[in-house]
Structure formats: C-alpha cells, structure tokens
Image (cartoon, rainbow, N blue to C red):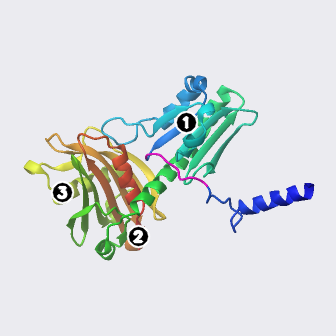
Amino acid sequence: MKSLSLGVLFAFILLSCNNNGKKDTSFLPKSLGNINSLQVIIENDLWNGDVGGVIRDFLAAPADGLPQEEPLYSINQMPPSTYTGFARKNRIFLHVTLGAAEEVTIKEDPYAKPQTGVFVTAKSPQRLAELITENKNKILEAFKSSEITEKQRRINISLKKLDSLQDRLGVSLKMPSAYRTALATDDFYWFRKDLKSGSTNVIIYEVPMGLIGKDSVVSDIIKIRDSIGAGYLPVEDEGRFITEEAYAPYLFNSEIDGKFAYETKGTWEVKDQYMAGPFLNYAIRDEANDRYLIMEGFTYAPSETKRDLQFELEAILRSAKIK
C-alpha cells in the first residue's frame, strides 16, 4: 500500500510539471480584473494601521504626469479569511500576513493565469512594514511588468498594419486597429484613436543625436516637442501645442527594445486656451542610425480619467522594435 501511494504521488508530480520541469498551469482558471486593479489580502487591523499606510503610500500614490491626481493602482482590500474561490482569480495581488518566516516572494500563476502574486510574511507588524518598504521597488516592478504584458496581450487581438512606418522610420509597433493614421510623412507619423470626448494619440519622429545633451536633457526634450507641436499638430484658433510651462516634466532613465531611452512624463497645453492633458515621451538613443527616435503618447480627454488611457499608450510604445 505504501509503495502504491508513493507511485501515485510520483505520477502526480510528473503531471504537475511540463517537459522543462516547470509547473503545469493548464488546469488553472483564467485570471480576471481590470488593468491596474490590485487586490490586497491583509487583516483589517493591519490594513487600518501602519502596515496599510505603508502599502497605500506607494501602491495608491498619485501616478506621475497626470493633470489630476489618480492612484497608481485601484486597490481592493480583503482579509485572508475571505480570500477563497472566485476571489483568487484577480490578476495581480499583494498577500500580507503575520507568520514565523520573514520573506517577500513573487509568484507567477499561483491560483489563476496569467497572475502575479506578491507574498509578504513577517513576525510583527513593524517587520511587515519594514519588509514592504525595503522591497517596494521590486513589488512595483513586478506588478507593472505584469500589467504591461496583459495590456499588450489584449492589444494583440486586433492590430493595425504599420508597414510604411517600418520602411520610413525603421520602427515597428503593435498598435490596436482602433487607431487611425492622422498624418504620415517621410519623417513624421501621427496616429489617433477617437474617444467619446477627445482622443488618445501616438506620434513618432527622429532627431539628430546631438539635439539632446547630457546636461540639458529636459530642456532639450521640451524644445524638440514644442517645435514639433507647432509644426505638425494643428489646433483650433491657431493655438500652439506646447509642454505646460507651469510644471517641469518628470524624467527617468528607461529602455526600449534593449536601447537606452529618456522617459519624460508631463502635461501638454494649448497656449492661451483651455486645452491640456498628459503626455509620455521616449527619446530612444539609436546609435546605429546616429539619431534619437522620439515616440510619444498623449491624451486629450477632458471628461475622463486618464491613468488607464496613458497606460495603453505606454504599452503600445514599449512594444517598439527598432531595426
């Protein structure tokens, strides 16, 4: 009987792994959840105390570059006792508990697929707060990567053909078919998706490498995008499409298709008019072609929240392949 039980166990282990020794997830249910919708599993007293405060400080912090404050993630909290069945299908979650071990573990597809779960365990509330603080960048990166991948998967369902873009500017993108070509020249592309009120937009062009200096990155990027706005983006009543003058954009170092890129987030405006919105700009250092390839996504949606609209644009831009 003992040998039979061992045999059954061994067979189960084999069936639970694929040919590469990885966990078989074919039996898992499909995950659920809107983009940037985060589930936090934590006891109510911890959530209402310092631990919950630490979590909210970085996961519900205002997203960068938006004209009005919107949280980085829309958070739904629940105690562990209710985290069963259907509740375990949310695509991204943070599971925080008191326990004997002290660890932060990131797991892929623990209860559904695709799914990213971060498990944090510590012996005291103080140590939970410390562990979360120490690992917040790793946690943010895990959730961001998961959501970009999911958004790109959804985009891939129906893609727009962009053959001329690759021929003329040497870059390919995975863009939803809902976008139309607003303008296409040998050196400038503008794609637009109409919304109920407004639009989301992608523009792509190139500039010589020397136009962005190492000691003047932000000011140089502003000069470039303001000149492009004045020359290519028509607005009503002869207004000028420029970077908002009141606030300096956020600047980060990033990477697109393995190439270094300056990532700039901020707000655009139409000079002397009540038109404004967020933008996300990548200046990609393409040394092989002695240029910076500029890709930008911007939104005009005066009656809508803009976090998820900008997130779609980021997913599009991050799909770029440069030849």
Residue occupying image coordinates x 55% and y 40%:
87
Instruction: State how many labels appear.
Output: 3
Please provide percent x and percent y for residue 100. 76, 33
Q: Are marks 1 and 3 in contact (CB under 8 Å)?
A: no
Provide the secondary structure element on which disc 1 rests. Answer: strand
Please provide percent x and percent y for residue 197. 21, 46
Provide the secondary structure element on which disc 3 rests. Answer: loop
To which quarter of the image does residue 276 belong? top left
- Residue picked out by circle 3: 233
Q: Name the residue type under label 3.
A: Leu
Please provide percent x and percent y for residue 302. 23, 41
Q: CA distance from mark 1 to mark 3?
A: 42 Å
- Residue picked out by circle 1: 40
Q: Which residues are magenta?
A: 28-34
Q: Are marks 1 and 2 in contact (CB under 8 Å)?
A: no
Please provide percent x and percent y for residue 301. 25, 45
Residue occupying image coordinates x 26% and y 44%:
277
Q: Residue furthest right?
A: 2
In this orientation, which residue lies closer to the viewer: 278 or 7? 7
Callout 3: few (<14), some (14-19), or many (20+) C-alpha neighbours within 10 Å?
some
In this orientation, which residue lies closer to the viewer: 193 or 69? 193
Q: CA distance from mark 1 to mark 2?
A: 38 Å
**250 relative position to 3: left or right:** left
First in sequence: mark 1 or mark 3?
Answer: 1
Q: CA distance from mark 3 to mark 2?
A: 24 Å
Q: Is residue 31 magenta?
A: yes
Q: Is residue 296 visible?
A: yes
Provide the secondary structure element on which disc 2 rests. Answer: strand
